[in-house]
Image: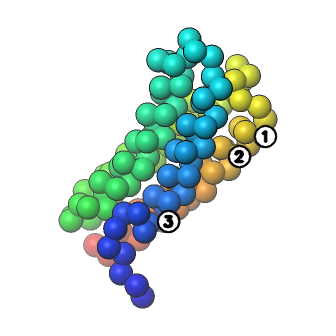
Amino acid sequence: MMSISSFKQLIAWQKGHKLVIDVYKCTKTFPKEEIFVLTSQLRRCAISITSNIAEGFSRKSIKEKEQFYSIALGSLTELQNQILIAFDIEYIDEETYLLLEEQSEEVRRIINGLIKSSSARG
């Protein structure tokens, strides 16, 4: 088995990073009055997911790793809520909503696997 030496090699981070990019792309079309509200919230949540995965990767103790991975899950849930709001107020269409929702569920499954994998090593 190959050893992972960088957070960028984690599938959770890679899929999360794709989600961040897609959130940035879709929020470019939001009304200007949302720049400091929903646009900012969506972007910060998405970034928080990958930031916490990266920080968790660098932590030495299993407990700390799990804490940061769990925070990433919390940010992901917050993002899913905001994506639903953006869809409900018609800032994103159904196709975009379904794409982001599918991506976020995939990231959720992978982060949960990362947490379980960390626990198994401890």
Q: Residue at x 71, y 29 (%)?
A: 92
- Residue 9 position, x and y percent, is 43, 68
Label 2 environment density (alpha carbons within 10 Å; few <14, some 14–19, many ≥20): few
Which residue matches tag 3?
11
Q: Tags 2 and 3 in contact by the CB under 8 Å rule?
A: no
Q: Is residue 9 above or below residue 96?
A: below
Please indicate whether residue 59 sits to the left or right of residue 38 in the image: left
Q: Residue most toward the top?
A: 33
Identify which residue is drawn at 73% across, 39% down: 96
Evaluate whether residue 90 shows in this view: yes
**Point 54% across, 57% down: residue:** 15
Which of disc 3 and disc 1 is earlier in sequence?
3
Say whether marks 2 and 1 touch (CB < 8 Å): yes
Q: State the image coordinates of residue 57 (x, y, percent, origin top left).
A: 31, 62
Q: Secondary structure at mark 1?
A: helix
How many residues crowd mark 3 within 10 Å: few (<14), some (14–19), many (20+)? some
Which of the two labelled residues, at mark 2 and mark 3, occupies the earlier sequence position?
3
Which residue is the site of mark 2?
A: 99
